[in-house]
Image (cartoon, helix red, strand yellow):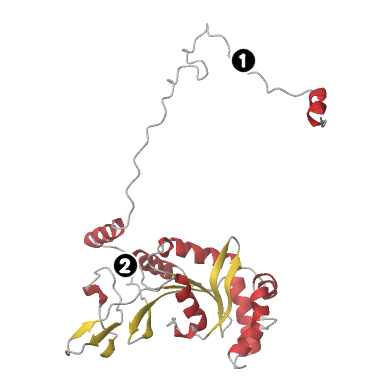
């Protein structure tokens, strides 16, 4: 069976609302007929997670930085970041991995990476190393982030420039947020595109890693998803199309439950009788306070 990869295949022919181009693998069977190879599913999210951890350089990130993975399942506040990495410039990188069928692959994953970024912003490098990455650095046999990068990149980094870049990344919140999926939902593409258009301190990369099985070999095709440029003023047709696309994934509106019957505003809420001059006042008894003797009795063992 022959095969080749087309990188100009416009997926919008199949899914109209995806504006980016997705590589497609075509195969030829024994009869000489060519056909589009259907991607294979990842058996579990952990498989994609481990793939990115082992080969972070396969990710086609904006600017093509070289990454060094520092830790996996790193606790940041009330959550755990899938991967924490760093560029050779010192910029910290948060990587979150999701499969498209995970309900968090839409809006929740963006909230996750933003909360992790907020947790890191303002830390000093020594706090990052001693409180956040201490266990992971120990597993790497390194004392500092710089040591880990030097080991991974064969001492090709400028130590002072890297240290300054790391400190600046933490202080200013200049981070790279990377979301890796097997397929990018349209809603997530729109959301990340919006964030990219309104922030200049965060770099947000949305990456799909499509999996194929060919002749017993596992082949993956990474692709950086480029959201369509956002318009400052939508036409009526564009506004309708956006609303129609978002409503396709919207859960049904919950039915309005009628509230319990309340007494009219001019009735006594305790007695239900009309408020008037002849109404007896309502007396509320204070809570019973146990006497010292009863307290002693309660605490004296029998």
Residue corresponding to mark 2: 231
- Quadrant of res 156: bottom right
Residue at image location 33% in from the left, 54% down from the top: 250
Q: Report crowding for label 2: few under 14, some 14 to 19, many 20 or more residues within 10 A (C-alpha).
A: few
Horizontal side, residue 275 vs residue 293: left or right: left
Query: Which label is found at residue 92?
Result: none
Please give the residue where the numbered disc 1 appears in the rendered image.
Answer: 283
Quarter of the image where the C terminus is located:
top right
Rendered location of residue 129, percent (x, y): 67, 75
Q: Residue at x 44, y 21 (%)?
A: 265
Where residue 267 sits: x, y (%)? 46, 16
Drawn side of residue 199 relative to residue 240, left or right = right
The front one of 10 and 274 is 10
Tell me how far mark 2 sits from mark 1, CA to CA. 65 Å
Q: Residues within 10 Å of mark 1 (few under 14, many from 20)?
A: few
Q: How many marks?
A: 2
| Image height of 26 relative to 287, above or below | below
Nearest to the observer: residue 272 or residue 45: 45
**Image quadrant containing the N terminus:** bottom left
Report the residue that reaches farthest toward the top.
278
Q: Residue 159, image x and y in percent? A: 65, 88
Q: Earlier in the sequence, mark 2 or mark 1?
A: 2
Image coords of residue 231 (percent x, y): 31, 67
Q: Secondary structure at mark 2?
A: loop
Tag 2–tag 1 contact (CB < 8 Å): no
Residue farthest along the front direction in this orientation: 302
Does 215 sit left or right of 57 as displayed? left
Which residue shows up at 52% across the image and 18% down it? 270
* In the rendered image, the vertical position of residue 241 relative to residue 53, given as above or below: above
């Amino acid at each position: 069976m022959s095969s080749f990869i087309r990188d100009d295949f416009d997926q919008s022919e199949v899914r109209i609302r995806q504006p980016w181009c997705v590589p497609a693998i075509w195969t030829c069977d024994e009869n000489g007929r060519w056909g589009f190879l259907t991607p294979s599913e990842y058996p579990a999210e952990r498989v994609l997670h481990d793939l990115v951890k082992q080969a972070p350089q396969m990710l086609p990130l904006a600017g093509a930085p070289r990454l060094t993975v520092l830790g996996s399942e790193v606790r940041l506040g009330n959550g755990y970041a899938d991967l924490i990495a760093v560029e050779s410039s010192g910029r910290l990188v948060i990587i979150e991995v999701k499969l498209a069928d995970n309900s968090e692959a839409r809006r929740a994953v963006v909230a996750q990476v933003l909360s992790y970024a907020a947790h890191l912003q303002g830390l000093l490098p020594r706090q990052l190393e001693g409180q956040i990455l201490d266990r992971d650095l120990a597993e790497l046999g390194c004392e500092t982030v710089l040591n880990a990068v030097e080991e991974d990149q064969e001492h090709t980094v400028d130590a002072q420039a890297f240290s300054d870049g790391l400190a600046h990344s933490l202080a200013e919140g200049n981070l790279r947020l990377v979301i890796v999926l097997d397929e990018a939902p349209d809603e997530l593409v729109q959301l990340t595109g919006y964030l990219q258009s309104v922030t200049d301190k965060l770099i947000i990369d949305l990456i799909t890693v499509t999996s194929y099985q060919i002749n017993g070999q596992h082949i993956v095709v990474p692709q950086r998803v480029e959201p369509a440029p956002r318009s400052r003023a939508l036409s009526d047709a564009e506004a309708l199309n956006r609303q129609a696309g978002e409503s396709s994934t919207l859960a049904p509106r919950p039915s309005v439950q009628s509230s319990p019957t309340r007494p009219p505003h001019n009735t006594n809420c305790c007695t239900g009788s009309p408020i008037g001059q002849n109404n007896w006042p309502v007396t509320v008894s204070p809570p019973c306070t146990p006497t010292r003797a009863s307290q002693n009795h309660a605490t004296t063992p029998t």
